[in-house]
Image: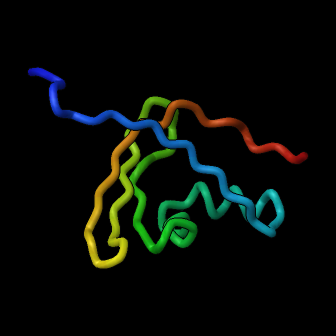
Amino acid sequence: MSDVGVAKYSLTVEVTARSTVEEAWDLLGDPGKVGRLFWGSTVESDFKAGSPIVWKGAWEGKVFEDKGTILKREARHSQ
């Protein structure tokens, strides 16, 4: 199968939140909650390195489904 005509993208997401470290990890690690950060989308993943991640939702009336792979997951830590 050829990759001709297939676009490949990389995305890095960074969010600044006013919360405790514990609240942030709870929000980011719970598929039922993390969509609140990203326009009401839903997220499907087990959040383990190497696992797929799928974001589904609608933006400005258009349905989308974005897929990726969890590259790594860092342990919880305080600053």
Q: Compared to 79, does 22 lie above or below? A: below
Q: Nearer the viewer, residue 20 or 66?
A: 66
**Is residue 24 left or right of 27 when viewed as pictured?**
right
Q: Compared to 16, does 11 lie above or below? A: above
**Is residue 17 left or right of 37 when viewed as pictured?**
right
Q: How many marks?
A: 0
Q: Residue at x 40, y 65 (%)?
A: 42
Q: Report the residue that reaches farthest toward the bottom.
A: 61
Q: Compared to 47, does 72 lie above or below? A: above
Quadrant position of residue 64 = bottom left
Quadrant position of residue 75 = top right
Q: Quadrant of the N terminus?
A: top left
**Is residue 34 left or right of 9 when viewed as pictured?**
right
Q: Nearer the viewer, residue 58 or 21?
A: 58
x, y percent for residue 57: 34, 68
x, y percent for residue 16: 74, 60
Q: Report the residue that reaches farthest toward the right.
A: 79
Q: Report the residue that reaches farthest toward the left.
A: 1
Q: Report the residue that reaches farthest toward the front.
A: 5
Q: Compared to 37, does 54 lie above or below? A: above
x, y percent for residue 40: 45, 74
Q: Residue at x 29, y 57 (%)?
A: 65
Q: Residue at x 61, y 36 (%)?
A: 73
Q: Residue at x 81, y 57 (%)?
A: 21
Q: Nearer the viewer, residue 22 or 58?
A: 58
Q: How is the image coloured?
A: rainbow
